[in-house]
Image (cartoon, rainbow, N blue to C red):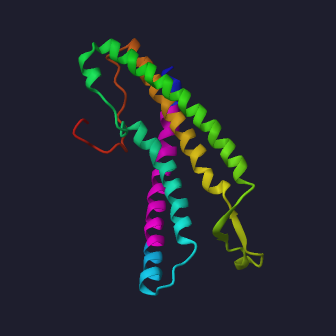
Amino acid sequence: MIYLLKVLVDLNTVLLKIGRQLAWISIGLMVVIILIQVFFRYGLNSALSWPDEAARFLMLWMTGFIAPSAYRWGGFISIEMLFRLLPSRITKILVLILLMISMMVLVVGLNFGLKHVESGWLFYSSSLKLPLHLIGMEVTKMKLAWMYMSLPVGLTLMTLVNIELIIKNLILLLNPKFEFPADPDEPKTEKN
């Protein structure tokens, strides 16, 4: 089980590092696109049609890329008051149950996300176009599936993180003194 955990931790570390890089690039582009829209709308009194949808596209991808890292590092809101009142072993069992429930939710969400992407191939964006004219082809509207794909990508990464957390909690349940190596990328906070 420890070998499986090591492989999964290494895989998640690489995938989440790439995801965080793509997330900050997405948010940077989103800010630039919004500033372009503000300039054209209020500076030139001529709003563009594409920036709103492009910013929404980037926001969805940014969320899909960064949410798994936040999940791995415990960055989601949680109520820990009950855990502080319960004995350590019962807390570990309760956390394991909650992680199993999370796994079910992630799998159902992933299934819905994949179906949504499948239907997205039928529809085009109202304003985003692929500039294929730059390579001598016809300009084509972007399929909405490219936007919807952020959901299954994010949920797949979160599922991998959830499996890692389940294995870690199983190990801690069997050996409470086991110490996992620290994640070098995790931001240092007061609780770390």
The reply to whether the magenta stretch includes residue 24 is yes
Kindly give the residue lying farthest to the bottom in the view shown: 44
The reply to whether the magenta stretch includes residue 128 is no
In depth, the one of 83 and 175 nearer the eye is 83
Residue at the spot 62% in from the left edge and 50% down from the top edge: 149
Residue 131's spot in the image, x, y percent?
Answer: 68, 74
Range drawn in magenta: 8-34
Residue at the spot 53% in from the left edge and 38% down from the top edge: 11
On screen, 125 above or below 104?
below
In depth, the one of 157 and 108 nearer the eye is 108
Kindly give the residue lying farthest to the right in the view shown: 137
On screen, 138 above or below 169?
below
In depth, the one of 51 and 87 nearer the eye is 51
Residue at the spot 45% in from the left edge and 51% down from the top edge: 20
- For this view, does 113 lie left or right of residue 55? right
On screen, 141 above or below 153?
below
Q: How many marks?
A: 0
Q: Quadrant of residue 85?
A: top left
On screen, 62 above or below 129?
above
In depth, the one of 64 and 46 nearer the eye is 46
Residue 183's spot in the image, x, y percent?
Answer: 37, 38
Kindly give the residue lying farthest to the left in the view shown: 190
Residue 96's spot in the image, x, y percent?
Answer: 43, 20
Q: Quadrant of residue 84?
A: top left
Residue at the spot 55% in from the left edge and 40% down from the top edge: 155
- For this view, does 123 lie left or right of residue 5? right
User: In which quadrant of the rendered image does the C terminus lie?
Assistant: top left
Query: Please, what is the dominant secondary structure of the magenta stretch?
Result: helix
- For this view, does 139 lie left or right of residue 158? right
Residue 9's spot in the image, x, y percent?
Answer: 48, 34
Q: Quadrant of residue 128?
A: bottom right
- For this view, does 51 lie left or right of residue 188? right
